[in-house]
Protein backbone atom coordinates (compact mmCIF):
# COMPACT_ATOMS: atom_id res chain seq x y z
CA UNK A 1 0.00 0.00 0.00
CA UNK A 2 1.16 3.50 -0.84
CA UNK A 3 2.01 5.79 2.07
CA UNK A 4 1.48 9.13 0.36
CA UNK A 5 -1.74 10.60 -0.92
CA UNK A 6 -2.45 11.25 -4.59
CA UNK A 7 -4.91 14.10 -5.14
CA UNK A 8 -6.43 15.26 -8.42
CA UNK A 9 -7.42 18.93 -8.62
CA UNK A 10 -9.99 19.76 -11.27
CA UNK A 11 -9.05 23.37 -11.88
CA UNK A 12 -12.16 25.18 -13.03
CA UNK A 13 -15.69 24.07 -13.81
CA UNK A 14 -18.11 25.69 -16.22
CA UNK A 15 -21.62 24.76 -14.98
CA UNK A 16 -23.79 23.39 -17.74
CA UNK A 17 -20.78 22.82 -19.98
CA UNK A 18 -18.40 20.77 -17.83
CA UNK A 19 -20.76 18.74 -15.63
CA UNK A 20 -20.17 15.41 -17.36
CA UNK A 21 -16.44 16.03 -17.97
CA UNK A 22 -15.82 17.01 -14.32
CA UNK A 23 -17.68 13.91 -13.17
CA UNK A 24 -15.53 11.77 -15.47
CA UNK A 25 -12.33 13.37 -14.17
CA UNK A 26 -13.38 12.32 -10.66
CA UNK A 27 -14.45 8.82 -11.67
CA UNK A 28 -11.21 8.29 -13.60
CA UNK A 29 -9.16 9.52 -10.64
CA UNK A 30 -11.04 7.07 -8.39
CA UNK A 31 -10.84 4.08 -10.73
CA UNK A 32 -7.17 4.54 -11.61
CA UNK A 33 -5.61 4.95 -8.19
CA UNK A 34 -5.96 8.49 -6.84
CA UNK A 35 -7.10 8.89 -3.24
CA UNK A 36 -9.04 12.11 -3.58
CA UNK A 37 -10.37 14.63 -6.08
CA UNK A 38 -10.84 18.32 -5.33
CA UNK A 39 -13.51 20.13 -7.36
CA UNK A 40 -14.56 23.76 -7.40
CA UNK A 41 -17.76 24.64 -5.56
CA UNK A 42 -19.78 24.86 -8.78
CA UNK A 43 -19.33 21.11 -9.24
CA UNK A 44 -21.48 19.83 -6.36
CA UNK A 45 -23.55 17.69 -8.76
CA UNK A 46 -20.38 15.95 -9.92
CA UNK A 47 -19.38 15.42 -6.29
CA UNK A 48 -22.72 13.74 -5.57
CA UNK A 49 -22.35 11.38 -8.55
CA UNK A 50 -18.77 10.42 -7.63
CA UNK A 51 -19.77 9.86 -3.99
CA UNK A 52 -22.66 7.65 -5.12
CA UNK A 53 -20.38 5.51 -7.32
CA UNK A 54 -17.86 5.20 -4.48
CA UNK A 55 -20.60 4.10 -2.09
CA UNK A 56 -21.90 1.48 -4.51
CA UNK A 57 -18.64 0.18 -6.02
CA UNK A 58 -16.17 0.78 -3.18
CA UNK A 59 -13.32 2.95 -2.13
CA UNK A 60 -11.64 4.42 -0.34
CA UNK A 61 -12.02 7.69 -2.26
CA UNK A 62 -12.85 11.23 -1.15
CA UNK A 63 -14.38 14.16 -3.01
CA UNK A 64 -13.82 17.69 -1.69
CA UNK A 65 -15.14 21.04 -2.90
CA UNK A 66 -13.14 24.25 -2.70
CA UNK A 67 -13.77 27.91 -3.36
CA UNK A 68 -10.02 28.52 -3.52
CA UNK A 69 -8.23 26.03 -5.80
CA UNK A 70 -5.31 28.45 -6.17
CA UNK A 71 -4.76 28.36 -2.43
CA UNK A 72 -4.36 24.56 -2.62
CA UNK A 73 -1.81 25.03 -5.39
CA UNK A 74 0.14 27.63 -3.41
CA UNK A 75 0.16 25.74 -0.09
CA UNK A 76 0.48 22.13 -1.26
CA UNK A 77 3.37 20.34 0.41
CA UNK A 78 4.44 17.76 -2.11
CA UNK A 79 4.94 17.41 -5.85
CA UNK A 80 2.61 19.19 -8.29
CA UNK A 81 2.08 17.74 -11.77
CA UNK A 82 0.09 19.84 -14.21
CA UNK A 83 -1.30 17.89 -17.16
CA UNK A 84 -1.12 20.07 -20.29
CA UNK A 85 -0.51 19.46 -23.97
CA UNK A 86 2.32 22.00 -23.75
CA UNK A 87 4.36 20.05 -21.21
CA UNK A 88 7.15 17.52 -21.42
CA UNK A 89 6.17 14.12 -22.82
CA UNK A 90 4.94 11.80 -20.07
CA UNK A 91 7.24 9.03 -21.25
CA UNK A 92 10.31 11.21 -20.61
CA UNK A 93 9.38 12.26 -17.05
CA UNK A 94 7.30 9.39 -15.65
CA UNK A 95 10.21 7.63 -13.93
CA UNK A 96 11.41 10.84 -12.28
CA UNK A 97 7.89 11.64 -11.07
CA UNK A 98 7.47 8.09 -9.77
CA UNK A 99 10.78 8.38 -7.87
CA UNK A 100 10.07 11.84 -6.42
CA UNK A 101 6.57 10.94 -5.26
CA UNK A 102 7.59 7.78 -3.42
CA UNK A 103 8.19 9.94 -0.33
CA UNK A 104 5.70 12.77 -0.66
CA UNK A 105 2.12 13.56 -1.69
CA UNK A 106 1.27 14.23 -5.33
CA UNK A 107 -1.18 16.81 -6.64
CA UNK A 108 -2.25 16.24 -10.26
CA UNK A 109 -3.80 19.36 -11.80
CA UNK A 110 -6.33 18.94 -14.60
CA UNK A 111 -7.72 22.09 -16.22
CA UNK A 112 -11.23 22.76 -17.45
CA UNK A 113 -10.83 26.12 -19.12
CA UNK A 114 -7.79 28.14 -20.12
CA UNK A 115 -5.24 27.59 -17.35
CA UNK A 116 -3.50 30.71 -16.02
CA UNK A 117 0.28 30.91 -16.39
CA UNK A 118 0.83 30.82 -12.61
CA UNK A 119 -0.32 27.17 -12.63
CA UNK A 120 2.49 26.33 -15.07
CA UNK A 121 4.92 28.27 -12.86
CA UNK A 122 3.98 26.59 -9.57
CA UNK A 123 3.98 23.05 -11.02
CA UNK A 124 7.03 20.91 -10.43
CA UNK A 125 6.25 19.12 -13.71
CA UNK A 126 4.18 20.27 -16.68
CA UNK A 127 3.39 16.97 -18.39
CA UNK A 128 1.87 16.18 -21.77
CA UNK A 129 0.18 12.99 -22.84
CA UNK A 130 0.97 13.77 -26.48
CA UNK A 131 1.34 17.38 -27.53
CA UNK A 132 -2.02 17.27 -29.27
CA UNK A 133 -5.43 18.52 -28.13
CA UNK A 134 -7.56 15.80 -26.53
CA UNK A 135 -9.69 15.09 -23.47
CA UNK A 136 -8.37 15.87 -20.01
CA UNK A 137 -9.97 12.61 -18.89
CA UNK A 138 -7.81 10.67 -21.35
CA UNK A 139 -4.72 12.56 -20.22
CA UNK A 140 -5.44 11.80 -16.57
CA UNK A 141 -6.06 8.11 -17.30
CA UNK A 142 -2.83 7.68 -19.24
CA UNK A 143 -0.83 9.63 -16.64
CA UNK A 144 -2.14 7.59 -13.68
CA UNK A 145 -1.59 4.32 -15.53
CA UNK A 146 2.00 5.35 -16.29
CA UNK A 147 2.54 6.53 -12.71
CA UNK A 148 1.41 3.19 -11.28
CA UNK A 149 2.98 1.16 -14.08
CA UNK A 150 -0.33 -0.66 -14.52
CA UNK A 151 -0.62 -1.87 -10.91
CA UNK A 152 -3.78 0.20 -10.30
CA UNK A 153 -5.65 -2.18 -12.60
CA UNK A 154 -5.40 -4.88 -9.90
CA UNK A 155 -6.65 -2.64 -7.06
CA UNK A 156 -8.83 -4.16 -4.35
CA UNK A 157 -11.94 -2.17 -3.39
CA UNK A 158 -13.45 -1.98 0.10
CA UNK A 159 -16.89 -1.00 1.32
CA UNK A 160 -18.70 -1.81 -1.93
CA UNK A 161 -22.21 -3.15 -1.92
CA UNK A 162 -21.81 -4.56 -5.43
CA UNK A 163 -19.13 -5.63 -7.85
CA UNK A 164 -18.84 -6.22 -11.55
CA UNK A 165 -18.14 -9.79 -12.64
CA UNK A 166 -15.90 -9.70 -15.73
CA UNK A 167 -17.45 -11.51 -18.70
CA UNK A 168 -16.50 -11.90 -22.32
CA UNK A 169 -20.04 -10.96 -23.35
CA UNK A 170 -22.87 -9.33 -21.43
CA UNK A 171 -23.05 -7.60 -18.07
CA UNK A 172 -23.13 -9.00 -14.57
CA UNK A 173 -23.19 -6.98 -11.34
CA UNK A 174 -23.63 -8.88 -8.09
CA UNK A 175 -23.96 -7.93 -4.43
CA UNK A 176 -20.70 -8.14 -2.49
CA UNK A 177 -22.40 -10.10 0.28
CA UNK A 178 -21.95 -13.74 -0.80
CA UNK A 179 -25.30 -14.64 0.79
CA UNK A 180 -27.00 -12.17 -1.56
CA UNK A 181 -25.40 -13.45 -4.76
CA UNK A 182 -27.53 -15.28 -7.31
Image (cartoon, helix red, strand yellow):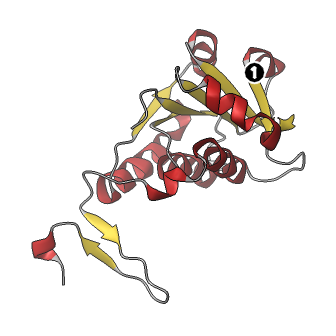
x and y, in percent, of residue 59 in the image? 34, 48
Q: Quadrant of the N terminus?
A: top left
Q: Residue at x 66, y 41 (%)?
A: 14
x and y, in percent, of residue 47 in the image? 45, 43
Q: Residue at x 72, y 48 (%)?
A: 139
In this picture, is 173 found above or below 47?
below
- Residue 114: image quadrant is top right
Q: Is residue 83 toward the left or the right of residue 153 in the image?
A: right
Count of numbered tags: 1
Q: Is residue 85 visible?
A: no
x and y, in percent, of residue 52 in the image? 35, 53
x and y, in percent, of residue 70 in the image? 64, 17
Q: Residue at x 63, y 11 (%)?
A: 74
In this picture, is 14 found above or below 133?
above
**Outermost left residue:** 179
Q: Nearer the viewer, residue 18 or 16?
A: 18
**Outermost top residue:** 75
Q: Is residue 158 toward the left or the right of residue 97 in the image?
A: left
Q: Kindly state the secondary structure of the residue where label 1 is placed.
A: helix
Q: Which residue is mark 1?
A: 119
Q: Nearer the viewer, residue 14 or 109?
A: 109
Amino acid sequence: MREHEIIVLRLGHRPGRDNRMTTHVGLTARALGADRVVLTNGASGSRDTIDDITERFGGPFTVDLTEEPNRLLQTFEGTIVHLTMYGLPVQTVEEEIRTVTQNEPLLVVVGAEKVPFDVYACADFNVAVTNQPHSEVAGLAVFLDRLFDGSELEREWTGADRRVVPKETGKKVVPTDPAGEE
